[in-house]
Image (tube, grey):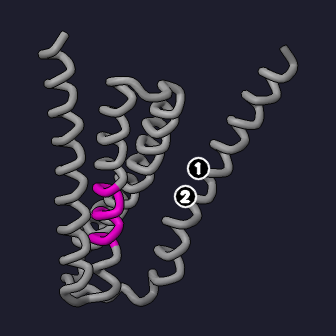
Amino acid sequence: MKKQKNKKIKASNKMKKFLLISMIGIISPKLVLAQQVNFSISNDGIAYASRFTSDLSLLLSVVIGLIATYLVFRAVKKLKGGLFGSILNFISLGMLFIVLGTIAVFMNSWFPGIWFNIISTAFFAMGYIFMVVGANKLLKGVMNV
């Protein structure tokens, strides 16, 4: 009984560490490079507020995407294979690539050029392809039953 409780405590500690590291990894470049973001907009407060909300929503989508991807990978590990395990594995890989593509879009404002556009497009395409493969496996598994 104590071993199971210790495993749960260790798992929750690992999850807390993962969430902390992922948030620091996403927020720290934003804070460090915040002085370098240069945008030309008018001098009214509405334009600055819209710029802030767009950055905040992009940052929140990355954080929520990382947390959701981690939770789906954890569910895959608990399922230990099978039809739904393989389906969730493909979907979680697709989610991971989409989050990486969103991070590439986020970095594009700091490092202008075509490379981050190409990288984000490739990540988005691979993410959607993995999700389609997972959905196709689900369809085949349901149709065969």
Q: Residue at x 25, y 89 (%)?
A: 112
User: Residue 23 appears in which quarter of the rendering?
Assistant: bottom right
Callout 2–callout 1 Cβ contact below 8 Å: yes
Q: CA distance from mark 2 to mark 1?
A: 6 Å
Where does residue 120 sit, x and y in percent of width and height?
Answer: 24, 69
Query: Is residue 102 in the magenta section?
Result: yes
On residue 19, which mark appears?
1
What is the three-letter code of the residue carrying label 1?
Answer: Leu
Q: How many discs appear?
A: 2
Disc 1 is placed on an element classified as helix
Above or below, 128 against 6 in this view is below
Q: Which of the two residues, 129 or 19, is positioned nearer the viewer here?
A: 129
Q: Residue at x 29, y 80 (%)?
A: 109
Query: Is residue 22 in the magenta section?
Result: no
Residue occupied by mark 2 = 23
Considering the image in quadrants, where does the C terminus appear? top left
Above or below, 43 against 54 in this view is below
